Image (spheres, rainbow, N blue to C red):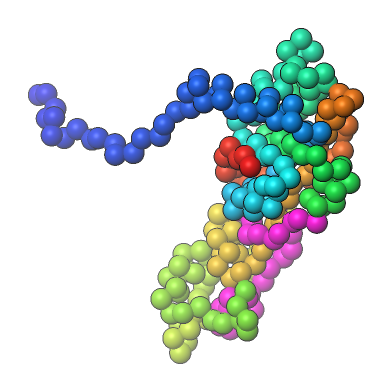
Amino acid sequence: MPRSKRAKIVSLTKVAKKTREDKSTLIEEVQQNIEKWKYCWLFEVGAMRNAYLKTVRKLWKDSARIFFGRGAVMAKALGTTVEEEHRPGLHKLAKQIKGQVGLLFTDSEPSEVTEWFDDFHPPDFARAGNLATRTVTLPAGPVLRVHSDPPEPFPHNEEPQLRKLGLGTVMKRGVPTLDAPHRVCAEGKPLTAEQAQLLKLIGERMVEFRVVMRARWEAESGEVTQVGSGVVVEDEEGKSGEDEEMSS
């Protein structure tokens, strides 16, 4: 029996694919900035958060241009071989474009750039797959939000969620309460989705958003200098994290 047309499921969401024109425009913009600025930095992002990337973009909007995401297109713009590179030396930078990396074009001196990004590492909540940086144990008694000042107990209507995340809570005087200490996570161990969510609920931040400079190309000499040795934190969701093309 033929299926009724009325039973057909129609998706109401549609994601526009990047067109060849979009890629050509990005390549052109990158190459225009190669001609404009003294330095092109390759940077890597750890504990990827779009909100913090937007903060970086805002703070550097008057003195730099930043591109993030779509690594293959950025590499093509620079040129991955000596024959294809847009300016001498750029192929050495293009070959390093892998993972959560971006390009920062600026005239600011190298010492100013590295010092600024070394100092910019706001704390954030860990995600599933991140390693716990410390052991967190909730004591017996009311379950508290540690990020409030002073810490305050969870309201009664959030007790079902706490139990769903693994806490053996009971209600006492309308407050979710533990009869015994509960270890949320152990230092050095990967976090589960439930542990990460629970840490977020109680206000425990375990990771830092970081932008680590990996290499620098100088327009005047065409030299590429390796500069970064820091470690970035990746999320279980994948190395691409929350990649978005970011320019300023």
Q: Nearer the viewer, residue 135 or 12?
A: 12
Please state, as top left, top right, bottom left or bottom right, where the C terminus lies in the image.
Answer: top right
Magenta segment, which residues? 119-146
> Viewed as shown, does residue 85 lie left or right of 52?
right
Q: Nearer the viewer, residue 195 or 51?
A: 51
Quadrant in the rendering for residue 157: bottom left
Image spot of residue 39 (x, y percent): 81, 34
The residue that appears at 45% across and 90% down in the rendered structure is: 173
Q: Nearer the viewer, residue 52 or 64?
A: 64
Quadrant in the rendering for residue 239: top right
Q: Is residue 79 above or below residue 109?
A: above
Q: Is residue 6 above or below residue 155?
A: above
Q: Tell me, yes or no, whether the highlighted magenta stretch contains residue 132.
A: yes
Please state, as top left, top right, bottom left or bottom right, where the N terminus lies in the image.
Answer: top left
Q: Nearer the viewer, residue 2 or 169?
A: 2
Q: Tell me, yes or no, whether the highlighted magenta stretch contains residue 64.
A: no
Quadrant in the rendering for residue 64: top right
The residue furthest bottom is 173
Main structural element of the magenta stretch: helix, strand or loop?
A: loop
Image spot of residue 234 (x, y percent): 67, 45
The residue furthest left is 1
Image spot of residue 113 (x, y percent): 82, 46
> Viewed as shown, does residue 31 lie left or right of 156?
right
Q: Is residue 191 above or below residue 26?
A: below
The residue furthest top is 83
The residue that appears at 68% across and 24% down in the rendered structure is: 31
Taking the image as drawn, is residue 72 in sight? Answer: no
Q: Is residue 6 above or below residue 22?
A: below
> Viewed as shown, does residue 16 lie left or right of 77?
left
> Viewed as shown, does residue 158 lie left or right of 95?
left
The residue that appears at 86% across and 43% down in the rendered structure is: 109
